[in-house]
Image: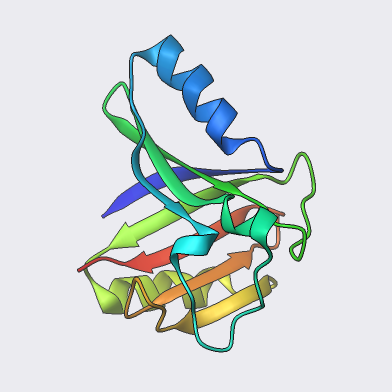
Amino acid sequence: MTLGVYINMKNQVREALDFYGEIFGSTCTDLMTYGSIKEEGGPEIDEKTKNLVMNASLQIEGDTVMFSDTPDFMEFIPGNNVTLVLDTKDAEKLTRYFDALSDGATKIMPLQKTFWSEKFGQLTDKYGVGWSFNLSE
């Protein structure tokens, strides 16, 4: 199991990847744009949004830091743009942690199947900390 950091930005991820990459001698891996996916039932995506980064990663001193642009159809709140990401191959553990942290939390997305994972969910815990839960393959 790993615990990672996820940073959301408002249309600045590509610039930030270059900036942090130069400082830490790292190159972006796994860059995916909103235009590269089409999830059934998802919102219509305009041309501007198609070019925004849905997910990208940088390795910084052996740790993975993930980034995402927040498109206009999602609320972006500066100061609340960092999320802890719990990633595990153990479905029971993932569900146990999600359920435990759900007490007093605001559930953003229940644990459910997505195009990248059999189980993924998000919540903001009772202390205001954002969490994402991902079942690895």
Q: In front: 40, or 109? A: 40
Residue 75: image x %, image y %? 78, 59
Q: In front: 74, or 46? A: 46
Q: Can you name the residue that lies furthest to the top here?
A: 23
Q: Quadrant of the N terminus?
A: bottom left
Residue 107: image x %, image y %? 65, 75
- The answer to whether residue 134 is above or below residue 76 is below
- On the question of residue 103 being in view, the answer is no
- The answer to whether residue 58 is above or below residue 56 is above
- On the question of residue 80 being in view, the answer is yes
The part of the image, by quadrant, that contains residue 130 is: bottom right
Q: In front: 10, or 65? A: 10
Residue 34: image x %, image y %? 53, 60
- In the rendered structure, the answer to whether residue 28 lies left or right of residue 98 reads left
Q: Residue at x 56, y 68 (%)?
A: 122
Q: Residue at x 33, y 58 (%)?
A: 87
- The answer to whether residue 100 is above or below residue 87 is below
Q: Residue at x 28, y 77 (%)?
A: 91
